[in-house]
Amino acid sequence: MTVHPPALLEELARFDTPAVCNGLEVLDPSYTLFSYTKDFLVCSHPDRPARVGYARTAQIRTTPPQGEDPAALKARRLAWYDHVAGDEGPQIAVHQDLDAAHGLAACWGDVMATVHLSLGVVGVVTNGAIRDIPGMPDGIQMLATGEKPSHGELHMVAFGQPVQVAGLRVADGDLVHMDRNGAAVIPHHLAAALPAAVRRVAEREQAIIAAARQGRANWPAVRKLMGG
């Protein structure tokens, strides 16, 4: 797995996810069309800052498991935790709910969040539902389809494989950036150059905003800044 310097991850976490997407577009214009979530997701704690980490992927269901041995289900669940615990650095759990009605029941709650946080998970992205938001620990952020009161018959189908969540394809080990706006995958080969690209876009945007705040009379200056 590609691992980046902690200082780079800390720097990336200072930006919001839209700014990260802007920077990716500067480095490669094709990123205007992919590498970010496209479906609506609810943020558990909108006021919390962005999270950056390495993806830990899994597929889950909250409907009853069909014909699987309870011992095998338990072993797979514990193997998932071992998978998460075995890697250093901040992690983002990306869980694809395979049920036809995504979010039939909650796949994350305060207990799971606390255990995962202790293993280095700082964020969760899922097309399933969550619960227990008031009890979530401070160090974790979540994006989900909504809230449900029950966990149903939550079980893990598989982990470590590529998943599709909210229109975003994520592979285990991908670098993920997330905040209240959604999530994006940062290609490893662009990560080091991304902060400078983000700052370039931000400087241009702030110049446009400052000029526009001066009113209609300053339109010629705004037009010039916008490339006119």
Image (spheres, rainbow, N blue to C red):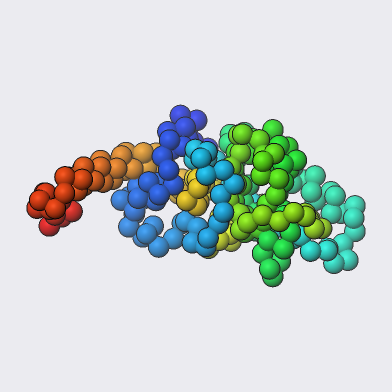
Residue, x 80% and y 51% (percent of image)? 76
Which part of the image, by quadrant, shows the C terminus? bottom left
Quarter of the image holding residue 116? Answer: top right
The foreground one among 139 and 162 is: 139
**Above/below status of 157 relative to 174:** below
Residue, x 49% and y 61% (percent of image)? 38
Asked whether, in this view, residue 197 is left or right of residue 104, the answer is left
**Image location (x, y in percent) of residue 173:** 58, 46
Which part of the image, by quadrant, shows the N terminus? top right
The single residue placed furthest to the bottom in the displayed view is: 100
**Number of numbered discs overlaid on the protein picture:** 0
Q: Is residue 46 visible?
A: yes
**Image location (x, y in percent) of residue 205:** 26, 46
Residue, x 10% and y 51% (percent of image)? 217
Q: Is residue 86 visible?
A: no
Asked whether, in this view, residue 220 is left or right of residue 189, the answer is left
**Image location (x, y in percent) of residue 67:** 88, 66
The single residue placed furthest to the top in the displayed view is: 7
Asked whether, in this view, residue 93 is left or right of residue 30, the answer is right
**Image location (x, y in percent) of residue 24:** 37, 50
Asked whether, in this view, residue 113 is left or right of residue 13, the answer is right
The foreground one among 141 and 26 is: 141
Residue, x 46% and y 29% (percent of image)? 7
